[in-house]
Image: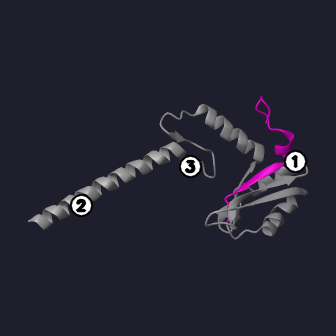
């Protein structure tokens, strides 16, 4: 993406494919998208560490030979059900542009950020999550100390 906000040439023919069911394989994905043009590359993302290591991450990128093929695939496949889940299809650069514009215009003073992902559901920022966990721990500690005091008073009487 350049400084004027336009999408660079590489991203114009590259699609983000999201909300993939975990049962969808690379071969299935290629079969679903090949009718719309010549696929130059496909990046199917996998978890590389943690308990889900080796499992699909639920999204991929497909690059077509032309921008027109990518736009056609986006128009035909966006919202289409695959294993009972509606696919989310965007131009890869479009997604980046939306996130960049969103992060530069939203205030972070409340500790929340709205990301334009999937269904447009807001997600809390890392600092807000940490604050929520600290508050939860504090309330659990308070409950625990009250319980101990109650048990002590029950044992004394």
Give residue 61's position: percent from left, percent from top: 78, 55
Q: Which is more toward the observer, 67 or 72?
A: 67
Answer whether residue 69 is magenta in the image. no
SS at badge 3: loop
| 41 up-or-down from 7: above or below | below
Task: From the image, tell me which residue sits under label 3.
Answer: 121
Spatial CA distance of label 1 from label 3 is 30 Å
According to the picture, the residue beneath numbered tag 1 turns out to be: 68
Q: How many marks?
A: 3
Mark toward the start of the polypeptide (2 vs 1):
1
The stretch drawn in magenta includes residue 20: yes
Q: Which residue is mark 2?
A: 147
The answer to whether one can see residue 37 in this image is no
What is the quadrant of residue 42 in the picture? bottom right
Q: Report crowding for label 1: few under 14, some 14 to 19, many 20 or more residues within 10 A (C-alpha).
A: some
Residue at the image position 11 percent from the left and 64 percent from the top = 156
| In-image side of 57 versus 120 (left or right) | right
Please identify the quarter of the rendering in which residue 99 is found.
top right
Q: Regarding mark 1 in the picture, which secondary structure is present there?
A: helix
Of pointers 1 and 3, the one earlier in the residue sequence: 1
């Amino acid at each position: 993406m350049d400084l004027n906000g336009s999408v660079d040439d590489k991203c114009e023919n590259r699609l983000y494919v999201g909300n993939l069911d975990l049962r969808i394989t690379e071969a299935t994905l290629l079969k679903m998208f090949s009718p719309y043009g010549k696929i130059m590359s496909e990046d199917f993302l996998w978890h590389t560490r943690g308990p889900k290591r080796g499992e699909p991450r639920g999204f991929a990128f497909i690059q077509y030979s032309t921008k027109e093929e990518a736009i056609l695939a986006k128009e035909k496949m966006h919202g289409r059900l695959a294993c009972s889940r509606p696919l989310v299809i965007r131009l890869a650069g479009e997604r980046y542009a939306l996130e960049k514009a969103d992060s530069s215009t939203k205030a972070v003073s409340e500790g929340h950020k709205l990301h334009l992902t999937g269904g447009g559901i807001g997600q809390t920022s890392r600092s807000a999550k940490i604050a929520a966990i600290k508050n939860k721990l504090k309330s659990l500690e308070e409950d625990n100390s009250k319980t101990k005091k109650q048990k002590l008073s029950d044992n004394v009487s």
